[in-house]
Amino acid sequence: MPDIQTNRPALPPEIARRRTFAIISHPDAGKTTLTEKFLLYGGAIQMAGQVRAKGEARRTRSDFMQMEKDRGISVSASAMSFDYSGFRFNLVDTPGHSDFSEDTYRTLTAVDAAVMVIDGAKGVESQTQKLFEVCRLRDLPILTFCNKMDRESRDVFEIIDEIQENLAIDVTPASWPIGQGRDFIGCYDILRDRLQLMDRADRNKIAESIEINGIDDPKLVEHVPANLLETFLEELEMARELLPPLDRQALLDGTLTPIWFGSAINSFGVQELMDGISQYGPEPQIQKAEPRDILPEESKVSGFVFKVQANMDPKHRDRVAFVRMASGHFKRGMKLTHVRSKKLMTISSPVLFLASDRELAEEAWAGDIIGIPNHGQLRIGDTLTEGEALRVTGIPSFAPELLQGVRAGDPLKSKHLEKALMQFAEEGAAKVFKPSIGSGFIVGVVGQLQFEVLASRIEMEYGLPVRFEPSQFTSARWVNGDRQAIENFVNTNKQHIAYDNDGDTVFLTRLQWDIDRVERDYPDVRLTATKELMV
Ligand SMILES: Nc1nc2c(ncn2[C@@H]2O[C@H](COP(=O)(O)OP(=O)(O)OP(=O)(O)O)[C@@H](O)[C@H]2O)c(=O)[nH]1
Ligand SMILES: [Mg+2]
């Protein structure tokens, strides 16, 4: 049946059943824990590896880097695919910490929806607000999960109000919590009139679910203690009166978010959220590109790289490009045009990211996220097509805000260090500059924690202890202009000049005054804080 609003034909069923989304939130709200439970219900893993307290060893699937395991925080986005009740989920767990937000923002260009996790005790936090604004810019539909309801939480109406006020989006309750903190017993599933009871004894157990025929059903009295029942019925009545009902179109337009309440660690409320994503979440959407947008149902295959990760798995020491398929039906072995270099690439060993491992992807449809192992040809922002010169647009690149020098513990290992740094630069994990005078490297990142991640990864992945140290420079600007203009500029500013990993010229400085001076004295050169990803 054609879609009434867009007048497009219905998507092929294989595409229509795909749900591709990112899980986002302020640090620590429970994204990785929720991801684990999705995998559990998706049948991808038998028993979710508990996400334990910070500092303890963890064994979650999406936090695979050593530093993530050690610290209990996510530092890198990771993708996972699994089937759930007839749907194919492609989920990306993102890091909450703002030092890693470039990764998160890029991920948001590759998904059709976001699941926003809120800590029930904290409500809308600063990073939630920022991420929400990015979703808003892209008109991404948002589904909300209010987590940690097993603990003391804030008043439910207060949380909903805060979302409506701070984020300027309508909220509709998809479920309603019964009891609070230690008295929390479960939720009423508003969309399906069921009572879901949480089992505190077994965290991986599927909640007991009882069908309820309206709020007068005597089963309610049987299962809900009298002291909680009265408050619950009052609240539910108020919620139904004050808050809008679930309207799928409003959700897809990004003007309404349904909210589920639950406790990821207790596997509670997760299945209802997954059913909600299946039933109400968006199908694969149109991808913005130049010179024209890409429709998922186009028969020709296209996709784009939104993340590159090296050394993901010590077993397969290689570099993987994360590719969001934008259109068509991809089959393994296809030859695709790498639009930036205009070269053909045979995609012979694409992988699907499953819970515990990767598997060869024999095929993929628009909406899927696959990994393409490569030797550095594929970079963030690259588009692959069956020949047409399309370029996906809108993938952000952040300006490096902190610069530090880096040195190998063993000075004889500086060639090794260079190799490691180039790898991370190509991955997009840092900007690396080689000053034109002197030796050593200068590394630029967005947030301080990225230095720690780099140091830890260089040591783990290259066996190379390194030291980061203060640099005399604090800002980096790419130098643009014609060749002659750049040459003149370079010759008179040698002590400020460095080259990035592509060999492009960069101006390093400590003072805004210097930047102003260049702009005044060299009208033919242009300094930019970021480098266009696609040239
Ligand atoms: N009480 C309670 N704790 C939870 C729940 N869900 C997660 N946690 C705990 O909250 C902490 C953070 O969980 P994570 O899943 O790592 O949070 P995250 O959002 O992935 O964190 P970052 O990736 O670092 O932003 C862990 O100690 C979890 O065990 C829950 O439902 N109830
Ligand atoms: Mg996490």
Image (cartoon, helix red, strand yellow):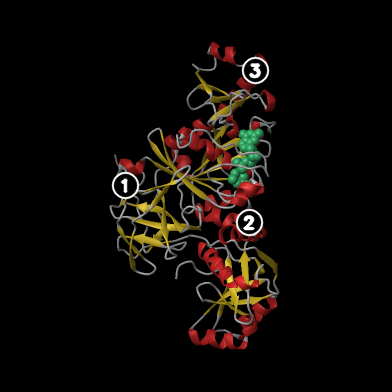
- Residue underneath mark 1: 8
Q: Is residue 326 above or below residue 206?
A: below
Along the line of sight, the residue nearer the viewer: 88 or 440: 440
Do callouts 2 and 3 mark residues in contact (Cβ within 8 Å)? no
- Give SS at disc 1: loop
**Within 10 Å of the Cα at label 1, are there few (<14), some (14-19), or many (20+) other Cα atoms?**
few
Image quarter (top left, top right, bottom left or bottom right) of the N terminus:
top left
Q: Residue 111's spot in the image, x, y percent?
A: 46, 49
Which of the numbered marks, if any, corresponds to residue 99? Answer: 2
Q: Amino acid at mark 3?
A: Glu
Do callouts 3 and 1 mark residues in contact (Cβ within 8 Å)? no
Q: Amino acid at mark 1?
A: Arg
- Give SS at disc 2: helix
Separation of residues labelled 3 and 1 (CA atoms): 48 Å
Separation of residues labelled 1 and 2 (CA atoms): 40 Å
Task: Give the mark, 3 or 1, whose residue is nearer the N terminus.
Answer: 1
Along the line of sight, the residue nearer the viewer: 514 or 168: 514
Q: Is residue 282 above or below residue 382?
A: above
Q: Is residue 386 left or right of residue 50?
A: left
Q: Residue 376's spot in the image, x, y percent?
A: 45, 65
Would residue 434 be visible to someone looking at this image?
yes
Which of the numbered marks, if any, corresponds to residue 230? Answer: 3
Q: Ligand 2, what quadrant?
A: top right
Foreground disc of the pair 2, 3: 2
- Give SS at disc 3: helix
Image quarter (top left, top right, bottom left or bottom right) of the C terminus:
bottom left
**Within 10 Å of the Cα at label 2, are there few (<14), some (14-19), or many (20+) other Cα atoms?**
some
Foreground disc of the pair 1, 2: 2
Q: Residue 158's spot in the image, x, y percent?
A: 66, 35
Q: Amino acid at mark 2?
A: Asp
Q: Residue at the spot x=61%, y=42% of the render?
A: 58
